[in-house]
Amino acid sequence: MERSFRITVDGQVFMVTVEELDGAPSTSAVSQPAPAFVQPVSAVVSAAAAQSAAPPAQGAVVSHLGGTVDEVSVTVGQSVAAGDRLATIEAMKMKNAIFANSAGTVKSIEVVAGDTVSAGQVLLRLG
């Protein structure tokens, strides 16, 4: 028997189909139908907080995911070109590079290696 589920992860919706295997506990003993999709409270709070937060100031470089700052590759006053690596964030044992979206000069660095960051948090500012 196959069942389909809608799963939301960090605001992104995924449709998943799960197949019951032989020997797995049967769901036929459940007397009530599966409940309609309910978004977890933490996701609702995060979405509400994201909507009420002001957008980052011009020149702010934000983390696109939560994790730990592995490395900051630039220094204050350094000129960078669009596409230059600015920092590396480790999340779930994977290193994710943060690149400059535009050319500029590093005006401030808001994090250091070892800091824990959230998605949307300002890492540094370009001018």
Image (cartoon, helix red, strand yellow):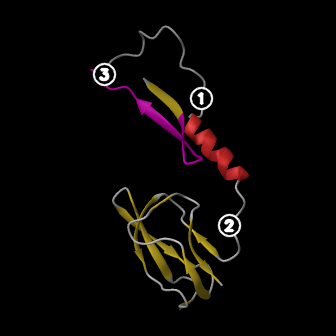
- What residue do we see at 60% from left, 88% from top? 105
Marks 2/1: CA–CA distance: 32 Å
To which quarter of the image does residue 8 belong? top right
Residue 42 in picture, x, y percent from top left: 56, 39
To which quarter of the image does residue 56 belong? bottom right
Marks 3/1: CA–CA distance: 23 Å
Residue 35 in picture, x, y percent from top left: 57, 20
User: Residue 9 in magenta?
Assistant: yes
**Amino acid at the residue labelled 2:** Pro
Dot 2 or dot 1: first in sequence order is 1
To which quarter of the image does residue 6 belong? top right
Q: Which residue is mark 1?
A: 37
Q: Which residue is mark 2?
A: 56
User: Residue 15 in magenta?
Assistant: yes
Secondary structure category for the residue under label 3: loop
- What residue do we see at 48% from left, 27% from top? 3
Range of magenta residues: 6-24
